[in-house]
Image: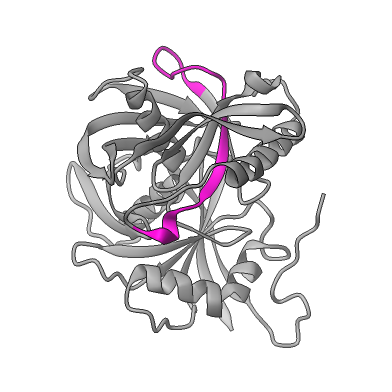
């Protein structure tokens, strides 16, 4: 078996776009395909994401046939642990690739790419210079000032918000860390432990789709709001994976939190910075239909992706490591 990919990155965070070679799905809807991918094709995800073809920080996007009538493309997002529901950095990469590859015809002054994601339809706008802005699915604050007990820091206080995936947020200095000077290993250790603690202590539900009702990761922030200068954040997800980008769905969720806390109003823009120095913008566009009992908003996220290459990966039957390996560090 040979799988063909296009390799891209957004602020240093990779997106391996699978364009050819994946076996056919029998599921009708995108969420059906996501479940089928977990049950029938997880060995291919592991083989593409993990060593020797990838690494623990690899991220992937599998193109599949859309079932939404307005979608240009449909995608399943994958990483070292499984299949996620939304990914902003990969959306930015996919939108630029779709236009530059001719998959979606370029228009002036910008091209709209409609991408069906497991969390819903996402519209992205690709400018002539390759910059991308996309409109989120309805984002909302899920829980504010909730307590989760940890072994290392005792009770920690977190906010939880949804921006296509659920994240726990807290300021790094609340647990004695600094996002610019603390060792990355300490930040990763904290993100992993807090994600486990929050998942155990705080039930999460999504009123529209049970498959989306889980904590995807923890985002540590510098405590700023991104108004006068970029606010740094680091997202730890899939256990110990570090997002090199500012995290598009995380930016969406941060803006929903700022709206809930009256730290930002409709029409206002904020800037967020990743551990690589990459910048995403987040702008509150408009109110959205409530998600269950919670008020929600549409957020516009902006950033830039770059192509790094193309690849053809073999999966030989006699290769004992064909399904990938990971080394615990």
Residue 239, x across and y down, in percent: 66, 49
Residue 144, x across and y down, in percent: 45, 29
Q: Is residue 121 left or right of residue 214?
A: left
Q: Is residue 269 left or right of residue 70?
A: right
Range of magenta residues: 209-231
Asked which colour scheme the image uses, the reply is one colour
| Towards the viewer: 193 or 182 | 193
Quadrant of image for the N terminus: bottom right
Task: Determine if the magenta segment contains residue 217.
Answer: yes
Residue occupying image coordinates x 48% and y 82%: 23
Q: Quadrant of residue 182?
A: top right
Residue 205 visible, this angle: yes
**Relative to residue 50, is residue 109 depicted above or below?**
above
Residue occupying image coordinates x 58% and y 58%: 79
| Towards the viewer: 192 or 60 | 192
**How many numbered marks, from 0 up?**
0
């Amino acid at each position: 078996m040979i799988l063909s990919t296009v390799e891209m990155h957004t602020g240093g965070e990779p997106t391996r776009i699978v364009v050819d070679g994946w076996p056919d799905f029998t599921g009708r809807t995108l969420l059906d395909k996501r479940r089928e991918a977990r049950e029938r094709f997880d060995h291919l995800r592991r083989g593409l994401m993990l060593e020797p073809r990838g690494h623990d920080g690899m991220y992937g996007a599998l193109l599949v046939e859309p079932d939404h009538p307005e979608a240009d493309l449909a995608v399943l997002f994958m990483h070292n642990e499984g299949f996620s529901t939304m990914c902003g950095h990969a959306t930015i990469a996919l939108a630029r690739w779709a236009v530059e590859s001719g998959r979606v015809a370029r228009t002036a002054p910008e091209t709209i790419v409609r991408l069906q994601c497991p969390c819903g339809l996402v519209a992205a706008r690709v400018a002539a210079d390759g910059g991308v802005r996309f409109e989120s699915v309805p984002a909302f604050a899920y829980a504010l000032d909730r307590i989760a007990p940890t072994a290392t820091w005792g009770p920690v206080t977190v906010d939880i918000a949804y921006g296509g995936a659920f994240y726990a947020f807290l300021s790094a200095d609340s647990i004695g860390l600094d996002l610019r000077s603390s060792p990355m290993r300490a930040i990763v250790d904290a993100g992993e432990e807090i994600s486990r603690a929050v998942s155990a202590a705080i039930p999460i539900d999504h009123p529209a789709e049970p498959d989306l009702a889980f904590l995807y990761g923890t985002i540590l922030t510098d405590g700023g709001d991104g108004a006068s200068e970029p606010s740094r954040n680091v997202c730890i997800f899939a256990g110990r994976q570090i997002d090199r980008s500012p995290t598009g769905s995380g930016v969406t969720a941060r803006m929903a939190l700022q709206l809930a806390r009256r730290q930002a109003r409709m029409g206002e823009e904020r800037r967020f910075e990743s551990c690589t120095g990459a910048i995403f913008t987040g702008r509150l566009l408009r109110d959205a239909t409530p998600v269950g009992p919670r008020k929600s908003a549409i957020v516009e996220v902006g950033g830039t992706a770059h192509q790094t290459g193309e690849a053809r990966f073999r999966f030989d039957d006699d290769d004992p490591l064909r399904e990938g390996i990971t080394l615990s560090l």
